Amino acid sequence: MSDSTVQCWLVERELGDRDFVTLVYATPDGSRYQQRQRSSTALRTGTQVTAAVEIPEEELEPVPDKETRERYATEVERTTDRYDPDDPI
């Protein structure tokens, strides 16, 4: 098990069924990601969504297709141009 983390950036946010928000953070090159679900109530009452988070390497999944990798890399670039890592978005 590794202790190393990777800075990942928010690339997708989607409101789903049952009052859950799905957040996707991806590596700068778009090749790996982590998906998280949070209740929208928790997000309104204190849990902030930041532009970037540190994620342990072993918790990242490979992005399965080239199109998604390219989209994530583009979104990371857009996010890094507009926000600092700790900025709430």
Image (spheres, rainbow, N blue to C red):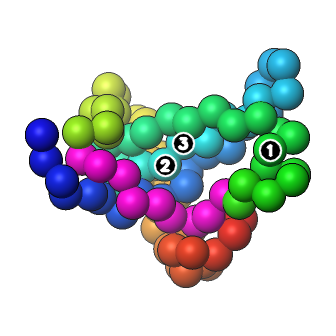
Residue 77 in the figure: left or right of residue 15: left
Examine the structure image and report whether residue 19 is included in the region drawn in magenta.
no
* Residue drawn where x is 58% and y is 65% of the image: 51
The residues tagged by marks 2 and 1 sit, at their Cα atoms, a distance apart of: 18 Å
Q: Which residues are magenta?
A: 49-57
Q: Quadrant of the C terminus?
A: bottom right
Q: Which class describes the residues within 10 Å of circle 1: few (<14), some (14-19), or many (20+)?
A: few
Which element carries disc 1, helix, strand or loop?
helix
Q: Where is mark 3, residue-wise?
A: 24
Q: Residue 38, percent across and down?
A: 69, 37
| The N terminus - image quarter | top left
Residue lying at 51% horizontally and 35% vertically, measured from the top left: 35
Q: Residue 25 — which label?
A: 2
Q: Which amino acid does the dot numbered 3 rest on?
A: Val
Tell which tag, 2 or 1, sits nearer the viewer. 1
**Disc 1 marks which amino acid?**
Ala
Q: Which mark is on residue 42?
A: 1
Q: Which residue type does callout 2 highlight?
A: Tyr
